[in-house]
Image: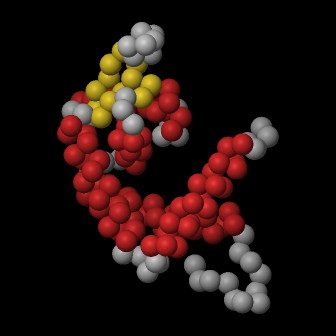
Amino acid sequence: MPAPAPHGPTPDLLQLLTHAERLLQRRLSAILRAEQCSPEAWRVLTLLAAEGGRPMTEVADGAFLPPGTLTKVVDQLVEHGLVYRRVDPLDRRRIRAYLSPRGRQLHDRIAARVRGSIAELAMPEGERDQLAALLGALGDALSRHPAAA
């Protein structure tokens, strides 16, 4: 999407975010297809790579997946030896998901390709860092003030 004319109307923030998200999603989808990894599985792998084991409910929330869908995704990841589950040692009613060494390798390989794809953009690193900070602040603000149902 071209930049707005200096004297023209300012584009709608939601439209700009949606446009950028769709273009980034296309880049990510191409990488994930080559690695035979679904977007849902990638979100789970990314969450588990960021921290040690996480309760399944946290993974569902963080991956934006309903619990039933998360169970299917994690079942597939377990079947491929990328993730494993264990009973939470502090609360035996909870199940935690962990990234296996093989899952870590896949995550790291895909993450490197994603970083490389983003680095190819004609956007200075400082601007990318600033954008990341602004998007983080926007996400925090939206979390503090959720939309009314």
| Corner quadrant of residue 92 | top left
How far across and down, in percent of the image, does residue 130 sit? 55, 67
How far across and down, in percent of the image, does residue 9 sit? 77, 81
How far across and down, in percent of the image, does residue 107 sit? 29, 47
Q: Is residue 106 left or right of residue 125?
A: left
Residue, x 49% and y 69% (percent of image)? 128
Residue, x 67% and y 43% (percent of image)? 143
Mark count: 0
| Corner quadrant of residue 30 | bottom left
Residue, x 62% and y 83% (percent of image)? 3
Q: Taking 60 as reference, is 123 above or below it?
A: below
Scheme of image coloration? secondary structure
**Quadrant of the rendering where the C terminus is positioned:** top right
* Residue reaching furthest to the top: 92
How far across and down, in percent of the image, does residue 74 sit? 35, 31
Instruction: Give 38 or 112, whichever is nearer the viewer.
Output: 112
* Residue reaching furthest to the right: 148
| Corner quadrant of residue 17 | bottom right
Residue, x 51% and y 38% (percent of image)? 62
Q: Taking 107 as reference, is 77 above or below it?
A: above
Q: Is residue 61 visible?
A: yes
**Quadrant of the rendering where the N terminus is positioned:** bottom right
Q: Is residue 69 visible?
A: no
